[in-house]
Amino acid sequence: MPYQFTYRPYKRRFIRPLQTNHGIWEIREGIIIHLQSETGKIGSGEIAPIPWFGSETLEEAVNFCQQLTSEINQEVIFSISNTLPTCQFGFESALEMVNGKQENFASSSFPLLQFSALLPAGIEALTAWKPLWQQGYRTFKWKISVYPIAEEITILESLVKALPTGVKLRLDANGGLNYQEANLWLFTCDNLQTTDVNHKFVEIEFIEQPLPVSEFEKMLELGDCYRTKIALDESVATFPQLETYYENGWRDVFVIKPGIIGSPFRLRQFCQKYQIDAVFSSVFETDIGRNAALQLAHELSLSQRAVGFGVNHWFQE
């Protein structure tokens, strides 16, 4: 069946620049695509690259869209190269919607999913969590490896003391630590995993991607040495990476960003076959990509872990 294909690029400015070990991110750019069937049904998808995570660049995605004709079919969509994972996700998501396999859900349509809110890096986290807590968030993610390690550990200790009991906290290094620093962070987190004199407990759920992708064996080793879990993020950004690191023995947490991992069809097959401990996470997409990603999280999340889609407060309403 042929589909009429159209697309348009977009830009969204963050309310304040997002600071990570990868640098400072000020504007989210991507592409919205539409497929229309012969019966007039329309499906929408989103292409939202993050090249420093291993996806194609925006320019490569735009070039791919430009070389397509105005009429495409399923064969074209399912033959998109693995070197264009965000294009795979966007086109397959649009195809699922136009064929009635995905609805335009709101977050409230997924009542079983809990959401994790992203805090700003550095000392701002000590105040930024409060309005998010009042909005109902009970899991927070905090970017580390942005400021000097001694400064960040001091902030972490203050943050754990400030957060209400029962909160879960995730630390995301974006691969920015060396082996000694990773040991220090994990040692610190283990020590903080105790009740204080007021019998308050804040769980440090895991550290995301403490070491660079190239140091997988060291992350395996660290995972055996500490109680605090390690989650792979950049290491499993695309589907071939996910397959590789599972085959190489990783059985702890996998952070999956549907918007950049590639084909939703292949992701479903993999997760259903191997029953991995997956945390689904945002790539700062619009509602179009977000709805498609949350549909996958709703289908494939096996644990009670919060999904990492608490990021809307980083954009203007």
Image: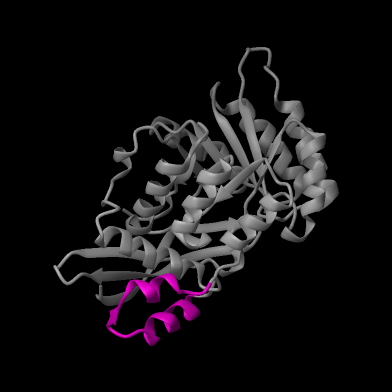
Residue 44, position as x, y percentages in the image? 29, 64
By secondary structure, the bulk of the magenta-drawn segment is best described as: helix
Q: Name the residue nearer the viewer: 127 or 300.
A: 300
Seen at 49% across and 51% down, the residue is 269
Query: Is 45 in the magenta?
Result: no
Name the colouring of the figure. Answer: one colour
In-front residue for pair 223/201? 223
Determine whether 207 is above or below 204 in the image.
below
Quick check: 312 left or right of 262?
Answer: left
- For residue 77: magenta? yes
Q: Residue at x 57, y 31 (%)?
A: 168
Quadrant into which the N terminus falls:
bottom left
Q: Residue at image x 55%, y 73%?
A: 83
x, y (%) of residue 142? Answer: 59, 43
Question: Would you identify the image quadrant in which residue 21 lies?
Answer: bottom right
Asked if residue 195 shows in the view, the reply is: yes
Position of residue 101 relative to residue 35, above or below, is above
Q: Is residue 105 left or right of residue 308?
A: left
Which residue does the image show at 72% across and 49% down from the upper left?
A: 210
Residue 152 at x, y = what percent?
Answer: 70, 43
Q: Residue furthest top?
A: 198
Instruction: Name the residue at the right extreme.
Output: 180
The x and y percentages for residue 124 are 56, 44
- Front residue of 100/140: it is 100
Q: How many marks?
A: 0
**Range shown magenta:** 58-81
Q: Quadrant of residue 240?
A: bottom right
Answer left or right for 223 relative to 71.
right
